[in-house]
Image (cartoon, helix red, strand yellow):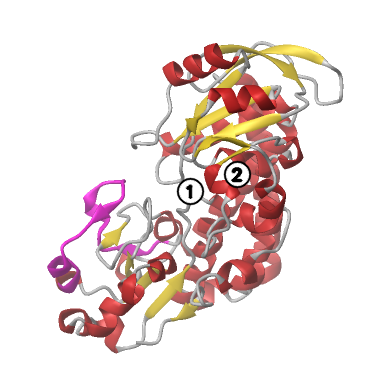
């Protein structure tokens, strides 16, 4: 199919998704029953947050702080990072290796702000009181040790006297967690008066996934490539057995994930199982390089059993950028998907330069084309064959 047809498909998909998303915002549980102005009118509004709490907030707020893994990322997605007046401890640190595109774009700005507490939502109410933001946003990933709850939001609000708007963070691994992502964006968008931008982000995600799926939808099951993702980051770097059975890029480009039968959450597999599966292609989350001896890459180089894998012997091991760094970096996982699609099915992605596409995606989400900076954090091993 020609690149012009794909461009047309993507534009049509964006428009259709935006119309559907705007309709959904008025007809689903994200509707608060109140209208939040999108201009500069100083007023208040009642918001129903992601835990069904009704919170009265200044709208639009003059300032904000974000608590919990990934919360500040959403503020950047909604182009409201300048409202931030305090950050948690991880935003104050200069990381040796930085895996968050929003921090690559705005880290210098955030590091100079006052501290609100420790990372992963360990707030210090007294420090927040000293900053006195208009609103506190609080999030965390459901089903993890870093999840947040209505009770935590209520306690923080009682201790500070500042409105706390909380919501689950979400992911793209399944429909339930995708709904959490979209709900979080819409909730924050309502508070900020950035409803249009929230719907634009949701529409972009939907259109991008649709483009990926449409390119590969008619590939017969027998012709789908067998694949494995190893070294997947999860609260830190991991080795070759760390994987995601529901790794979204594999789903979107119709690749056969050999670990797919192990559920939807992060999983560690037996090395013997990986050898038995012998996938045709292995992708390595380059976050693994933070481990001793380069983690999964070092294992593929030195472990005799892994050296016997077809992908290792025949040069089909590739690096992708880590998307799970202080929760999900949605822009990175979408960018990774285009590289994976191009690698597995080059004829279906003939019009795509993965690096250019990555910069397009990064610019949309965080306002800057940070692919080269991001990849340099991982020795430029992303979007490349890994030499063993």
- Magenta residue span: 254-275
- The image shows residue 114 at horizontal and vertical percentages of 66, 38
**231 displayed left or right of 60:** left
Q: Residue at x 63, y 69 (%)?
A: 373
Q: Is residue 271 above or below residue 327?
A: below
**248 displayed left or right of 197:** left
Residue bearing mark 1 = 326
State which tag comes first along the sequence, 1 or 2: 2
Q: Is residue 291 above or below residue 367?
A: below
Pointer 1 local density, CA inside 10 Å: few below 14, some 14–19, many at least 20: many
Q: Is residue 127 above or below residue 387?
A: above
Q: Residue at x 53, y 34 (%)?
A: 117
The reply to whether the C-beta atoms of the residues labelled 1 and 2 are less than 8 Å apart is yes
Residue bearing mark 2 = 73
**40 displayed left or right of 97:** right
Q: Residue at x 71, y 12 (%)?
A: 45
- The image shows residue 163 at horizontal and vertical percentages of 62, 16
Residue sitting at the far right: 40
- The image shows residue 236 at horizontal and vertical percentages of 38, 55
């Amino acid at each position: 199919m020609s690149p012009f047809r794909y461009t047309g498909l993507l534009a049509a998909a964006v428009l259709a998704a935006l119309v559907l998303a705007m309709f959904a915002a008025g007809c689903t549980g994200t509707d608060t029953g109140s209208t939040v102005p999108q201009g500069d009118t100083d007023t208040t509004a009642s918001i129903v947050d992601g835990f069904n709490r009704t919170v009265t907030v200044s709208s639009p707020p003059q300032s904000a702080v974000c608590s919990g893994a990934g919360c500040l990322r959403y503020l950047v997605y909604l182009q409201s990072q300048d409202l931030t007046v305090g950050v948690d401890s991880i935003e104050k640190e200069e990381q040796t290796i930085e895996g968050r595109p929003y921090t690559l774009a705005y880290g210098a700005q955030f590091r100079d702000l006052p501290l609100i507490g420790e990372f992963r939502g360990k707030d210090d109410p007294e420090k927040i009181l000293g900053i006195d933001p208009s609103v506190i946003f609080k999030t965390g990933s459901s089903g993890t040790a870093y999840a947040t709850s209505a009770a935590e939001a209520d306690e923080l609000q009682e201790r500070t006297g500042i409105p706390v708007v909380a919501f689950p963070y979400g992911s793209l691994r399944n429909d339930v967690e995708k709904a959490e992502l979209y709900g979080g964006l819409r909730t924050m968008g309502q508070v900020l008066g950035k409803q249009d931008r929230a719907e634009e982000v949701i529409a972009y995600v939907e259109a991008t996934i649709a483009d990926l799926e449409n390119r590969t939808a008619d590939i017969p099951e027998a012709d789908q490539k067998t694949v494995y993702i190893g070294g997947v980051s999860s609260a830190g770097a991991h080795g070759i057995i760390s994987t995601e059975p529901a790794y979204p890029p594999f789903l979107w480009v119709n690749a056969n994930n050999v670990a797919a039968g192990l559920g939807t959450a992060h999983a560690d597999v037996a090395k013997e199982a990986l050898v038995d599966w012998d996938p045709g292609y292995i992708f390595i989350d380059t976050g693994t390089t933070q481990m001793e001896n380069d983690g999964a890459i070092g294992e593929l180089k030195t472990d005799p059993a892994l050296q016997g894998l077809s992908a290792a012997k025949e040069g089909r091991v590739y690096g992708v950028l880590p998307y799970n760094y202080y929760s999900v970096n949605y822009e990175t996982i979408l960018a990774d998907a285009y590289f994976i699609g191009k690698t597995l099915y080059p004829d279906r992605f003939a019009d795509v330069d993965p690096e250019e596409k990555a910069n397009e995606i990064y610019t949309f989400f965080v306002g800057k084309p940070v692919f080269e900076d991001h990849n340099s954090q991982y020795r430029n091993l992303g979007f490349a064959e890994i030499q063993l």
